[in-house]
Protein backbone atom coordinates (compact mmCIF):
# COMPACT_ATOMS: atom_id res chain seq x y z
CA UNK A 1 0.00 0.00 0.00
CA UNK A 2 1.59 3.27 -1.09
CA UNK A 3 0.94 6.74 0.26
CA UNK A 4 -1.70 7.56 -2.34
CA UNK A 5 -3.64 4.39 -1.56
CA UNK A 6 -3.27 4.98 2.18
CA UNK A 7 -4.85 8.42 1.80
CA UNK A 8 -7.76 6.87 -0.04
CA UNK A 9 -8.20 3.81 2.21
CA UNK A 10 -7.75 5.85 5.34
CA UNK A 11 -10.68 8.09 4.47
CA UNK A 12 -12.69 5.02 3.55
CA UNK A 13 -11.89 3.45 6.92
CA UNK A 14 -12.97 6.56 8.78
CA UNK A 15 -16.32 6.32 6.98
CA UNK A 16 -16.56 2.63 7.80
CA UNK A 17 -15.85 3.29 11.48
CA UNK A 18 -18.32 6.19 11.63
CA UNK A 19 -21.03 4.06 9.96
CA UNK A 20 -20.26 1.17 12.27
CA UNK A 21 -20.59 3.24 15.42
CA UNK A 22 -23.54 5.27 14.18
CA UNK A 23 -25.54 2.12 13.42
CA UNK A 24 -24.12 -0.17 16.09
CA UNK A 25 -27.44 -0.64 17.89
CA UNK A 26 -28.91 -2.35 14.84
CA UNK A 27 -26.40 -5.18 15.21
CA UNK A 28 -27.04 -8.06 17.64
CA UNK A 29 -25.05 -7.09 20.70
CA UNK A 30 -23.84 -10.65 21.29
CA UNK A 31 -22.87 -13.12 18.56
CA UNK A 32 -25.05 -16.13 17.84
CA UNK A 33 -22.12 -18.38 16.93
CA UNK A 34 -20.07 -21.14 18.47
CA UNK A 35 -16.33 -20.78 19.05
CA UNK A 36 -14.58 -22.17 15.99
CA UNK A 37 -17.12 -20.71 13.53
CA UNK A 38 -14.24 -18.87 11.88
CA UNK A 39 -12.42 -22.03 10.85
CA UNK A 40 -14.64 -22.79 7.87
CA UNK A 41 -14.61 -19.14 6.75
CA UNK A 42 -10.89 -18.60 6.47
CA UNK A 43 -8.14 -20.56 4.70
CA UNK A 44 -5.83 -22.72 6.76
CA UNK A 45 -2.76 -20.86 5.53
CA UNK A 46 -1.75 -17.27 4.94
CA UNK A 47 -2.00 -16.26 1.25
CA UNK A 48 1.12 -16.71 -0.88
CA UNK A 49 0.29 -13.78 -3.12
CA UNK A 50 -1.11 -10.38 -2.19
CA UNK A 51 -4.90 -10.09 -2.07
CA UNK A 52 -6.98 -7.06 -2.91
CA UNK A 53 -7.79 -4.63 -0.11
CA UNK A 54 -11.43 -4.56 -1.22
CA UNK A 55 -11.66 -8.32 -0.60
CA UNK A 56 -10.18 -7.87 2.86
CA UNK A 57 -12.70 -5.16 3.76
CA UNK A 58 -15.56 -7.27 2.42
CA UNK A 59 -14.41 -10.09 4.67
CA UNK A 60 -14.53 -7.81 7.69
CA UNK A 61 -18.34 -7.87 7.42
CA UNK A 62 -18.58 -11.49 6.26
CA UNK A 63 -16.01 -13.13 8.53
CA UNK A 64 -15.15 -10.91 11.47
CA UNK A 65 -18.26 -8.94 12.41
CA UNK A 66 -20.57 -11.96 12.94
CA UNK A 67 -18.30 -13.12 15.76
CA UNK A 68 -17.96 -9.78 17.49
CA UNK A 69 -19.50 -8.86 20.84
CA UNK A 70 -20.30 -5.20 20.33
CA UNK A 71 -18.93 -3.66 23.52
CA UNK A 72 -19.88 -0.17 22.40
CA UNK A 73 -23.50 -0.98 21.65
CA UNK A 74 -25.99 0.81 23.91
CA UNK A 75 -27.44 -2.68 24.52
CA UNK A 76 -24.22 -3.78 26.23
CA UNK A 77 -24.44 -3.77 30.04
CA UNK A 78 -21.82 -6.37 30.95
CA UNK A 79 -18.61 -6.13 33.02
CA UNK A 80 -17.70 -2.43 33.30
CA UNK A 81 -17.73 0.28 30.66
CA UNK A 82 -14.93 0.15 28.10
CA UNK A 83 -14.10 3.67 27.04
CA UNK A 84 -14.32 4.83 23.45
CA UNK A 85 -14.22 8.19 21.74
CA UNK A 86 -13.38 9.55 18.32
CA UNK A 87 -10.39 11.68 19.39
CA UNK A 88 -8.85 8.63 21.10
CA UNK A 89 -9.24 6.63 17.87
CA UNK A 90 -7.62 9.39 15.85
CA UNK A 91 -4.75 9.63 18.34
CA UNK A 92 -4.33 5.85 18.17
CA UNK A 93 -3.91 6.19 14.44
CA UNK A 94 -1.21 8.81 14.97
CA UNK A 95 0.39 6.58 17.60
CA UNK A 96 0.62 3.86 14.97
CA UNK A 97 2.28 6.30 12.59
CA UNK A 98 4.85 7.57 15.08
CA UNK A 99 5.41 3.95 16.11
CA UNK A 100 7.82 4.72 18.91
CA UNK A 101 8.39 2.41 21.86
CA UNK A 102 7.40 4.06 25.14
CA UNK A 103 8.38 2.83 28.57
CA UNK A 104 5.44 3.40 30.87
CA UNK A 105 1.75 2.49 31.26
CA UNK A 106 0.59 -1.04 32.11
CA UNK A 107 -2.69 -2.58 33.12
CA UNK A 108 -4.39 -2.51 36.49
CA UNK A 109 -3.33 -6.12 37.04
CA UNK A 110 0.29 -5.30 36.35
CA UNK A 111 0.15 -2.30 38.66
CA UNK A 112 -1.05 -4.54 41.50
CA UNK A 113 1.79 -6.96 40.83
CA UNK A 114 4.44 -4.27 40.49
CA UNK A 115 3.37 -2.70 43.78
CA UNK A 116 3.44 -6.11 45.47
CA UNK A 117 6.93 -6.87 44.17
CA UNK A 118 8.20 -3.48 45.26
CA UNK A 119 6.66 -3.94 48.70
CA UNK A 120 8.19 -7.40 48.94
CA UNK A 121 11.69 -6.14 48.21
CA UNK A 122 11.31 -3.17 50.52
CA UNK A 123 10.08 -5.34 53.40
CA UNK A 124 12.84 -7.91 53.02
CA UNK A 125 15.43 -5.13 53.18
CA UNK A 126 13.77 -3.55 56.22
CA UNK A 127 13.42 -6.80 58.17
CA UNK A 128 16.99 -7.78 57.32
CA UNK A 129 18.33 -4.46 58.56
CA UNK A 130 17.02 -5.19 62.05
CA UNK A 131 17.49 -8.99 61.93
CA UNK A 132 20.77 -9.62 60.06
CA UNK A 133 20.74 -13.27 61.13
CA UNK A 134 17.67 -13.96 58.95
CA UNK A 135 18.29 -14.96 55.34
CA UNK A 136 16.27 -13.45 52.51
CA UNK A 137 14.65 -16.81 51.95
CA UNK A 138 13.53 -17.06 55.57
CA UNK A 139 11.92 -13.63 55.50
CA UNK A 140 10.37 -14.35 52.13
CA UNK A 141 8.59 -17.43 53.45
CA UNK A 142 6.96 -15.38 56.25
CA UNK A 143 5.55 -12.59 54.08
CA UNK A 144 1.78 -12.23 54.03
CA UNK A 145 -0.35 -9.89 51.91
CA UNK A 146 -4.03 -8.90 52.23
CA UNK A 147 -6.89 -7.90 49.95
CA UNK A 148 -10.65 -7.73 50.16
CA UNK A 149 -12.56 -10.94 49.52
CA UNK A 150 -14.26 -8.80 46.85
CA UNK A 151 -10.99 -7.86 45.13
CA UNK A 152 -10.30 -8.58 41.48
CA UNK A 153 -8.90 -12.01 40.56
CA UNK A 154 -5.69 -10.33 39.37
CA UNK A 155 -4.86 -9.44 43.00
CA UNK A 156 -4.67 -13.07 44.06
CA UNK A 157 -2.73 -13.84 40.90
CA UNK A 158 -0.21 -11.13 41.80
CA UNK A 159 0.40 -12.85 45.16
CA UNK A 160 0.88 -16.18 43.42
CA UNK A 161 3.35 -14.73 40.94
CA UNK A 162 5.08 -12.92 43.78
CA UNK A 163 5.30 -16.23 45.66
CA UNK A 164 3.73 -14.85 48.86
CA UNK A 165 0.70 -15.76 50.95
CA UNK A 166 -2.46 -13.75 50.49
CA UNK A 167 -5.25 -13.48 53.03
CA UNK A 168 -8.72 -12.44 51.93
CA UNK A 169 -10.25 -9.88 54.27
CA UNK A 170 -13.97 -10.27 55.02
CA UNK A 171 -16.10 -7.21 54.20
CA UNK A 172 -18.95 -5.40 55.96
CA UNK A 173 -22.58 -5.24 54.82
CA UNK A 174 -21.58 -2.77 52.08
CA UNK A 175 -18.87 -5.13 50.83
CA UNK A 176 -16.14 -2.78 52.10
CA UNK A 177 -13.02 -3.69 54.08
CA UNK A 178 -13.05 -1.98 57.49
CA UNK A 179 -10.13 -1.17 59.75
CA UNK A 180 -10.98 -3.37 62.73
CA UNK A 181 -11.17 -6.54 60.64
CA UNK A 182 -7.88 -5.86 58.90
CA UNK A 183 -6.16 -5.00 62.19
CA UNK A 184 -7.33 -8.25 63.77
CA UNK A 185 -5.94 -10.33 60.89
CA UNK A 186 -2.61 -8.51 61.00
CA UNK A 187 -2.35 -9.07 64.77
CA UNK A 188 -3.10 -12.77 64.39
CA UNK A 189 -0.53 -13.19 61.66
CA UNK A 190 2.15 -11.31 63.55
CA UNK A 191 1.47 -13.49 66.61
CA UNK A 192 2.00 -16.52 64.37
CA UNK A 193 5.44 -15.19 63.39
CA UNK A 194 4.44 -13.94 59.93
CA UNK A 195 5.40 -10.62 58.36
CA UNK A 196 2.42 -8.64 57.02
CA UNK A 197 3.71 -6.40 54.21
CA UNK A 198 1.05 -5.48 51.62
CA UNK A 199 -2.61 -4.55 51.44
CA UNK A 200 -4.39 -4.03 48.14
CA UNK A 201 -7.39 -1.78 48.76
CA UNK A 202 -10.13 -1.60 46.15
CA UNK A 203 -12.11 1.50 45.26
CA UNK A 204 -14.95 0.21 43.12
CA UNK A 205 -14.90 -3.58 43.42
CA UNK A 206 -15.72 -5.62 40.35
CA UNK A 207 -18.80 -7.45 41.71
CA UNK A 208 -20.65 -4.50 43.27
CA UNK A 209 -18.53 -1.33 42.99
CA UNK A 210 -17.87 -1.21 46.75
CA UNK A 211 -15.28 1.08 48.35
CA UNK A 212 -12.84 -0.08 51.02
CA UNK A 213 -12.67 2.39 53.90
CA UNK A 214 -9.29 4.05 53.26
CA UNK A 215 -9.49 6.40 56.23
CA UNK A 216 -9.61 3.34 58.53
CA UNK A 217 -7.27 0.91 56.77
CA UNK A 218 -4.73 3.54 55.63
CA UNK A 219 -3.40 4.49 59.09
CA UNK A 220 -3.18 0.80 60.06
CA UNK A 221 -1.11 0.02 56.97
CA UNK A 222 1.21 2.95 57.68
CA UNK A 223 1.65 1.98 61.36
CA UNK A 224 2.28 -1.66 60.54
CA UNK A 225 4.63 -1.04 57.61
CA UNK A 226 2.23 -2.48 55.05
CA UNK A 227 2.40 -1.08 51.54
CA UNK A 228 -1.09 0.13 50.65
CA UNK A 229 -1.85 -0.16 46.96
CA UNK A 230 -5.20 1.12 45.68
CA UNK A 231 -6.87 -0.64 42.79
CA UNK A 232 -9.41 1.87 41.45
CA UNK A 233 -9.46 0.42 37.93
CA UNK A 234 -13.06 1.38 37.14
CA UNK A 235 -14.11 3.96 39.72
CA UNK A 236 -10.88 5.97 39.67
CA UNK A 237 -12.04 8.02 36.68
CA UNK A 238 -15.02 9.31 38.66
CA UNK A 239 -12.74 11.21 41.03
CA UNK A 240 -12.50 13.97 38.45
CA UNK A 241 -15.95 14.88 39.86
CA UNK A 242 -15.70 16.62 43.27
CA UNK A 243 -18.88 14.93 44.54
CA UNK A 244 -17.08 11.55 44.58
CA UNK A 245 -13.93 12.77 46.35
CA UNK A 246 -15.15 11.80 49.88
CA UNK A 247 -14.64 8.18 48.78
CA UNK A 248 -10.95 9.06 48.43
CA UNK A 249 -10.58 10.18 52.05
CA UNK A 250 -7.49 8.42 53.37
CA UNK A 251 -5.80 8.25 49.96
CA UNK A 252 -2.87 10.13 51.51
CA UNK A 253 -1.90 6.89 53.29
CA UNK A 254 -1.47 5.04 49.99
CA UNK A 255 1.91 4.04 48.60
CA UNK A 256 0.56 3.48 45.10
CA UNK A 257 -2.67 4.06 43.20
CA UNK A 258 -3.91 2.81 39.86
CA UNK A 259 -6.91 3.43 37.63
CA UNK A 260 -7.84 2.65 34.06
CA UNK A 261 -8.73 5.63 31.87
CA UNK A 262 -9.62 2.92 29.35
CA UNK A 263 -12.57 1.94 31.49
CA UNK A 264 -14.37 5.17 32.13
CA UNK A 265 -12.47 8.18 30.84
CA UNK A 266 -13.22 7.97 27.13
CA UNK A 267 -9.73 6.72 26.29
CA UNK A 268 -9.91 3.58 24.19
CA UNK A 269 -8.31 0.37 25.44
CA UNK A 270 -5.64 0.09 26.61
CA UNK A 271 -4.60 2.80 29.00
CA UNK A 272 -3.90 2.39 32.71
CA UNK A 273 -2.30 5.01 34.93
CA UNK A 274 -0.24 4.18 38.03
CA UNK A 275 0.96 6.63 40.66
CA UNK A 276 3.68 5.75 43.16
CA UNK A 277 4.43 7.80 46.28
CA UNK A 278 8.19 7.20 46.24
CA UNK A 279 9.53 6.26 42.84
CA UNK A 280 12.73 5.02 44.46
CA UNK A 281 10.72 2.19 46.06
CA UNK A 282 9.96 0.84 42.64
CA UNK A 283 13.13 1.59 40.74
CA UNK A 284 15.57 1.04 43.60
CA UNK A 285 14.02 -2.08 45.06
CA UNK A 286 14.38 -4.08 41.90
CA UNK A 287 18.05 -3.37 41.48
CA UNK A 288 19.05 -4.55 44.96
CA UNK A 289 17.64 -8.03 45.13
CA UNK A 290 18.77 -10.74 42.84
CA UNK A 291 15.42 -12.37 42.10
CA UNK A 292 13.82 -9.04 41.36
CA UNK A 293 16.36 -7.61 38.99
CA UNK A 294 15.71 -10.28 36.41
CA UNK A 295 11.95 -9.75 36.59
CA UNK A 296 11.79 -6.01 36.47
CA UNK A 297 14.42 -3.82 34.92
CA UNK A 298 12.68 -0.49 35.27
CA UNK A 299 9.10 0.01 36.38
CA UNK A 300 7.17 -2.91 35.06
CA UNK A 301 7.41 -6.20 33.25
CA UNK A 302 7.29 -5.37 29.56
CA UNK A 303 10.05 -3.07 28.40
CA UNK A 304 8.44 -1.57 25.32
CA UNK A 305 5.08 0.15 25.21
CA UNK A 306 2.83 2.09 22.89
CA UNK A 307 2.60 5.88 23.04
CA UNK A 308 -0.59 5.78 25.10
CA UNK A 309 -0.39 9.23 26.60
CA UNK A 310 -1.06 10.61 23.13
CA UNK A 311 -4.67 9.48 23.13
CA UNK A 312 -5.18 10.79 26.65
CA UNK A 313 -3.86 14.15 25.54
CA UNK A 314 -6.27 14.22 22.59
CA UNK A 315 -9.24 13.18 24.73
CA UNK A 316 -8.51 15.64 27.53
CA UNK A 317 -8.23 18.51 25.07
CA UNK A 318 -11.23 17.62 22.93
CA UNK A 319 -13.60 16.98 25.88
CA UNK A 320 -12.12 19.20 28.55
CA UNK A 321 -12.67 18.43 32.21
CA UNK A 322 -16.28 19.55 31.92
CA UNK A 323 -16.96 17.13 29.06
CA UNK A 324 -15.39 14.22 30.91
CA UNK A 325 -17.30 15.05 34.09
CA UNK A 326 -20.52 15.19 32.08
CA UNK A 327 -19.78 11.71 30.73
CA UNK A 328 -19.24 10.25 34.23
CA UNK A 329 -22.31 12.00 35.63
CA UNK A 330 -24.49 10.82 32.80
CA UNK A 331 -23.54 7.19 33.43
CA UNK A 332 -24.19 7.58 37.15
CA UNK A 333 -27.58 9.16 36.55
CA UNK A 334 -28.54 6.40 34.09
CA UNK A 335 -27.60 3.83 36.75
CA UNK A 336 -29.79 5.65 39.29
CA UNK A 337 -32.62 5.67 36.75
CA UNK A 338 -32.30 1.92 36.33
CA UNK A 339 -32.14 1.51 40.12
CA UNK A 340 -35.45 3.40 40.48
CA UNK A 341 -37.09 1.11 37.93
CA UNK A 342 -35.91 -1.97 39.81
CA UNK A 343 -37.00 -0.59 43.20
CA UNK A 344 -40.46 0.17 41.86
CA UNK A 345 -40.97 -3.51 41.06
CA UNK A 346 -41.61 -5.46 44.27
CA UNK A 347 -40.53 -8.76 42.70
CA UNK A 348 -36.95 -7.48 42.59
CA UNK A 349 -34.38 -6.23 45.07
CA UNK A 350 -31.27 -4.06 44.85
CA UNK A 351 -28.29 -5.97 46.25
CA UNK A 352 -25.66 -3.28 46.79
CA UNK A 353 -25.56 0.48 47.17
CA UNK A 354 -25.63 2.17 43.77
CA UNK A 355 -22.78 4.67 43.90
CA UNK A 356 -21.53 4.86 40.32
CA UNK A 357 -22.51 3.27 37.01
CA UNK A 358 -23.35 -0.22 38.29
CA UNK A 359 -26.61 -1.69 39.57
CA UNK A 360 -26.64 -5.12 41.25
CA UNK A 361 -30.12 -6.60 41.42
CA UNK A 362 -32.02 -9.88 41.56
CA UNK A 363 -35.46 -11.41 41.77
CA UNK A 364 -36.46 -12.13 45.38
CA UNK A 365 -36.37 -15.79 44.43
CA UNK A 366 -33.90 -18.68 44.40
CA UNK A 367 -30.46 -18.51 42.86
CA UNK A 368 -31.61 -21.03 40.26
CA UNK A 369 -34.42 -18.78 39.13
CA UNK A 370 -32.15 -15.75 38.88
CA UNK A 371 -29.69 -17.80 36.90
CA UNK A 372 -32.50 -18.82 34.58
CA UNK A 373 -33.55 -15.20 34.17
CA UNK A 374 -30.04 -14.21 33.19
CA UNK A 375 -29.85 -17.09 30.73
CA UNK A 376 -33.05 -15.89 29.08
CA UNK A 377 -31.88 -12.29 28.98
CA UNK A 378 -28.66 -13.21 27.29
CA UNK A 379 -30.27 -15.80 25.03
CA UNK A 380 -32.63 -13.17 23.67
CA UNK A 381 -29.57 -11.20 22.60
CA UNK A 382 -31.40 -7.89 22.92
CA UNK A 383 -29.07 -6.85 25.75
CA UNK A 384 -26.05 -8.41 27.40
CA UNK A 385 -25.36 -8.77 31.14
CA UNK A 386 -23.02 -10.77 33.37
CA UNK A 387 -23.70 -12.04 36.90
CA UNK A 388 -21.80 -11.91 40.19
CA UNK A 389 -22.01 -13.59 43.58
CA UNK A 390 -22.85 -11.44 46.61
CA UNK A 391 -23.39 -12.97 50.08
CA UNK A 392 -24.07 -16.34 48.48
CA UNK A 393 -26.66 -14.87 46.13
CA UNK A 394 -26.68 -15.10 42.36
CA UNK A 395 -26.89 -11.44 41.34
CA UNK A 396 -27.37 -9.71 37.98
CA UNK A 397 -24.97 -6.86 37.23
CA UNK A 398 -26.29 -4.02 35.11
CA UNK A 399 -23.35 -1.75 34.22
CA UNK A 400 -23.82 1.38 32.16
CA UNK A 401 -21.15 0.85 29.56
CA UNK A 402 -21.61 2.63 26.26
CA UNK A 403 -20.97 6.30 25.55
CA UNK A 404 -24.19 6.28 23.53
CA UNK A 405 -26.52 4.77 26.16
CA UNK A 406 -29.53 7.05 26.71
CA UNK A 407 -32.53 7.01 28.99
CA UNK A 408 -34.71 5.31 26.35
CA UNK A 409 -32.23 2.42 26.18
CA UNK A 410 -32.48 2.00 29.95
CA UNK A 411 -36.28 2.04 29.82
CA UNK A 412 -36.27 -0.52 27.03
CA UNK A 413 -33.73 -2.75 28.77
CA UNK A 414 -35.84 -2.71 31.94
CA UNK A 415 -39.10 -3.49 30.20
CA UNK A 416 -37.35 -6.35 28.43
CA UNK A 417 -35.98 -7.73 31.73
CA UNK A 418 -39.28 -7.37 33.57
CA UNK A 419 -41.16 -9.02 30.70
CA UNK A 420 -38.82 -12.02 30.77
CA UNK A 421 -39.19 -12.15 34.55
CA UNK A 422 -42.98 -12.18 34.24
CA UNK A 423 -42.85 -15.05 31.77
CA UNK A 424 -40.50 -16.99 33.99
CA UNK A 425 -42.56 -16.46 37.14
CA UNK A 426 -45.74 -17.43 35.31
CA UNK A 427 -44.18 -20.70 34.20
CA UNK A 428 -43.06 -21.48 37.74
CA UNK A 429 -46.56 -20.82 39.12
CA UNK A 430 -48.08 -23.10 36.50
CA UNK A 431 -45.80 -25.89 37.61
CA UNK A 432 -46.91 -25.59 41.25
C1 LIG B 1 -11.16 -4.20 35.40
C2 LIG B 1 -10.53 -4.35 36.73
C3 LIG B 1 -9.22 -4.87 36.85
C4 LIG B 1 -8.44 -5.41 35.67
O1 LIG B 1 -7.92 -4.40 34.89
P1 LIG B 1 -6.84 -4.69 33.75
O2 LIG B 1 -6.34 -3.34 33.38
O3 LIG B 1 -7.53 -5.38 32.63
O4 LIG B 1 -5.77 -5.55 34.35
C5 LIG B 1 -8.65 -4.92 38.11
N1 LIG B 1 -9.33 -4.49 39.20
C6 LIG B 1 -10.58 -3.99 39.12
C7 LIG B 1 -11.29 -3.52 40.37
C8 LIG B 1 -11.23 -3.90 37.88
O5 LIG B 1 -12.47 -3.39 37.81
Image: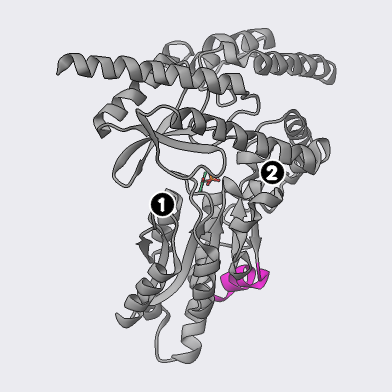
x 26%, y 15%: residue: 426
* Label 2 with label 1: CB-CB less than 8 Å: no
Of residue 115 and residue 426, the one placed in the foreground of this image is: 426
Residue at mark 2 to residue at mark 1: CA–CA distance:
31 Å
x 47%, y 45%: residue: 353
x 48%, y 13%: residue: 43
Q: Quadrant of the N terminus?
A: top right
Q: Secondary structure at mark 1?
A: loop
Of residue 31 and residue 80, the one placed in the foreground of this image is: 80
Magenta stretch containing residue 324, yes or no?
A: no
Of pointers 2 and 1, the one earlier in the residue sequence: 1
Which residue extends farthest left? 432
Of residue 221 and residue 309, the one placed in the foreground of this image is: 221
Which residues lie in the magenta part? 277-290
Q: Which residue is mark 1?
A: 150
Magenta stretch containing residue 281, yes or no?
A: yes
Q: Position of residue 352 (x, y in %)?
A: 43, 44
Q: Position of residue 52 (x, y in %)?
A: 67, 9
Q: Which residue is mark 2?
A: 306
Q: Is residue 373 left or right of residue 126?
A: left
Amino acid sequence: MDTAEFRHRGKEMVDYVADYLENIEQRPVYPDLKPGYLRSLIPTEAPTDPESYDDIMKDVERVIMPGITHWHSPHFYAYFSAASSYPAMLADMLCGAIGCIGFSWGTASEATLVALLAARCKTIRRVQASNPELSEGEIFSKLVSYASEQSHSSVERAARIGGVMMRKVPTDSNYAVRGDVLRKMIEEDKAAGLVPFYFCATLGTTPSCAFDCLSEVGPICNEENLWMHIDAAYAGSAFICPEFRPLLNGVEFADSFNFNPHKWLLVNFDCSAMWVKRRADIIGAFKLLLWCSSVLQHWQIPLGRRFRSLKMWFVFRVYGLSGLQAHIRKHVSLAKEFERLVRADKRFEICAKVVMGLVCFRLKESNELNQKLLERINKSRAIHLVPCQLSGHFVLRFAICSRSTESHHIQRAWSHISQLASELLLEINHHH
